[in-house]
Structure formats: structure tokens, C-alpha cells
Image: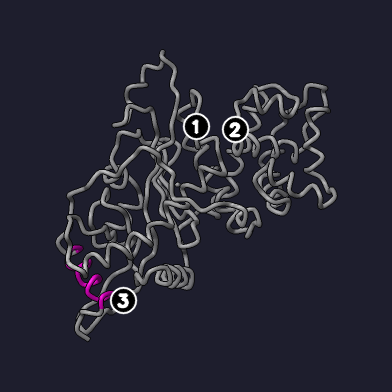
Amino acid sequence: MGMVGVLDNGSKRNFFGLCSVSPSKDVDEFELVFKVSRKTFNYICSLVSEPMMAKATNFAFLDGKSMSLNDQVALALRRLSSGDSLIGVANFFGTNHGTVSKVTWRFVEAIEERGLHHLQWPSTEAEITQIKSKFENIRGLPNCCGVIDTTHIMMLLSATDRTADAWLDRHDNHSMILQVIVDPEMRFRDIVAGYPGKMDDASVLQKSSFFDLSKKGERLNGNKLKLSEGTEIQEYIVGDSGFPLLPWLITPYQGRELPETKTEFNKRHFATRLVAQRALARLKDMWRMIHGVVWRPNKDRLPRVILACCILHNIVIDMEDGVLDELTLTSQHDSGYRSEVCDMADNKASVSRDNLARYLSGRLPG
């Protein structure tokens, strides 16, 4: 996974009763507060237990009672999922904002240490074959292994921050870019977080380890698919027009009044790309700390907070969590931003895209 800097891949405490075994009537309230089911919560606790409890620090509530592991995980999940301020979360649980900050950071470190197996590129042929099959079932794109997209994480920086201007994007917002590659079940398979929001999609891609691995033929190097006699297509991912057209990254055709073959290809391409847009929209909706504007973030730590949210997003999918059934599917994740058009196009990739478009329209010779 790519990384930049750190990354390239009592009265107010009544909700804590929800963390222990309690009647089923509390389930809806539990999921409302923590954004995950009790089953998923218990799994996350078991995942982070050792690294979170290894350090001697004793976190406590204002009444002096020590925080259990479940208490700490609940507090961190509430901080990440609610989007509330440190003080808001502290008041909610009956502690102070410094404790909220420290517990959340310890949780982020623990998720990063123990949860990365939930966010990785497919490692077996069987897994990649299943992914290709599910993508083809969406709108017919064969041999497709993923969808790439980016989103902006907004930041409110201090007026005294000397580096603030470096984070101004083309819409005059301070932001950080998150690039993701998504599978057909909206699971993140590769992420890059940490670059300034003013960078375009092509530049972020070219700085990623995924780009290097793919360029060297060490990724997307599985079985080629025969489209017709003498015509085949390699494994690839799809992305919008902000990305370069490469042998392993297929982008849509540009221009108006395109011939029917190209228009049909673009429709299939767009329908497939929706998977990534919906994944990013769900990420921001569930983990609202990165949904709005992050208040004066530590810019070295923020990429790791983003990573933790991406891992949690995947854990919810991997656990087949029932909370997903309640979510409204939307593709709106980057309001106000439009993709720029990248003019970079590899000649071999142009031929491959044309062959794929003709194959999908039934116009390739057998």
C-alpha cells in the first residue's frame, strides 16, 4: 500500500452500558452511537486489545474510574464516526478532551498495527478471479480488477500555520487528497493519503507505489483475456478522465458526439466507476471525522487517521455488518470538485481500449 510521510496504504457515561452484554432492545441504540454492530465492535476490541493494553497508561473518567478496553474502543469509534469535537466527545462520555485525543490516537495506531490485513491487494488467483467476475457482472467489463478514484479531506488550518498555503487546492480550500482503488464490494484494496489537495489525480497516481508496481509489471500482471482471435487484454483498473490512459488503467473516451461504440463503452465504464464513488461516499458518511472540515489537524497524523477509517470501512464489509443494510447509497463524496482532464495517453492503451469497446459492442471479429 502506498504511503506519504507516514502513509502511501456516570450520567454522561450511560452509553457504556451498551458495550457490555445487554438486552436486544439496545441494539439499535448501540449501532446509532457507534456506527457498527455489537458483533463488529467485539471483533474490533479483540483486534486492538494487545497493542492498546500493552502500554501502562491508565486512562480514566472524570470520576476517577479507569477506562476498560471496551470503553477506550467505544470512545475512539465515537470520535471517528460522529465528527464531534474533542470537547463534544469528552462531554458525551464524562472525561476530558486530552484523554479523548490520546485514546483515539492509540486506537488509530492499534488499528494500523493489527488491521492492515483487511486492506490489501488480492493475493491469490482465486480472489482476483472472483473480483473480475463481479466487476463483469456490473456492466460487462471483462478482466477488470478495480476502480481508482480520489477525494478531498477538508482541513481548517491555523492562520499562524506557515505551511497553510501549500495545502490550498484549486478551489481555495485547505485539503488533503485520498486516492483509493476499490473492489466490486466497495472494499478498499489500496490507498494513498497525505498529498496536498492541489495535486491532480495523475500526479498523485504517479507518486504511488501502485503506479511503480504496475509500470514494472509486478501488479495487474495476471492472466490476459482473449477477446477474439489475435486480440487480448491484460488485467486493468478503470478511472475517470483525470487519470492517464495506460495499458493497465482504462479511462473513458473524451469528446462529444462520439460514435455508438464509444458511447456505449463510456456508459459501461461510468456504471462500473460508481462503485468507487459510492465507497468514498460511504467512508465519509460513516466516519464523519473526515467528512466535513478537520479542525486544525496534525498533518503528519491525519493520513494515519484516514487509513484507520479506511480499515474500519473494510472491517464493516468483511464482517457482513447489518448496519450496511440501513445505509443509503449515494455517489456524492467530493461536493464542489470536478475532475480535471488528463491528456496523457499511451498508444498501446488506446488500441486496447478500442478493442475492448468493439468487443463489448460485438464488433470484434471472432
Question: Counting other residues with Cα less than 10 Å from the Cα at mark 2, is it few (<14), some (14-19), or many (20 or more)?
Answer: some
Q: Quadrant of the C terminus?
A: bottom left
- Determine if the magenta segment contains residue 360: yes
Q: Amino acid at mark 1?
A: Arg
Image quarter for residue 104? Answer: top right
Magenta stretch holds residue 24: no
Q: Earlier in the sequence, mark 3 or mark 1?
A: 3
Q: Which mark is residue 147?
A: none
Q: Is residue 218 visible?
A: no
Identify which residue, 53 or 28, lies in the foreground.
28
Task: Find numbered disc 1 in the image and state the secondary structure of the residue it sits on.
Answer: loop
Camera-nearest label, 3 or 1: 3
Residue sitting at x 35%, y 34% = 197
Q: Main secondary structure of the magenta part?
A: helix
Q: Nearer the viewer, mark 3 or mark 2?
A: 3
Residue 273 found in image quarter? bottom left
**In this rendering, position of residue 205 left or right of residue 343:** right
Q: How far apart are labels 3 and 1 at the CA level?
A: 42 Å
Question: Is residue 151 depicted above or below 275 in this figure?
Answer: above
Span highlighted in magenta in the image: 349-361
**Residue drawn at x 40%, y 39% as measured from the top left:** 335
Picture coordinates of residue 314 (x, y %)? 55, 53
Instruction: From this view, report whether residue 52 is shown above or below residue 161.
Output: below
- Asked whether 98 or 6 is in front, the reply is 98
Q: Tell me the residue that label 3 is attached to.
A: 225
Q: Which residue is mark 2?
A: 105
Element type where label 2 sits in the image: helix
List x then y, in percent, for residue 323: 64, 53
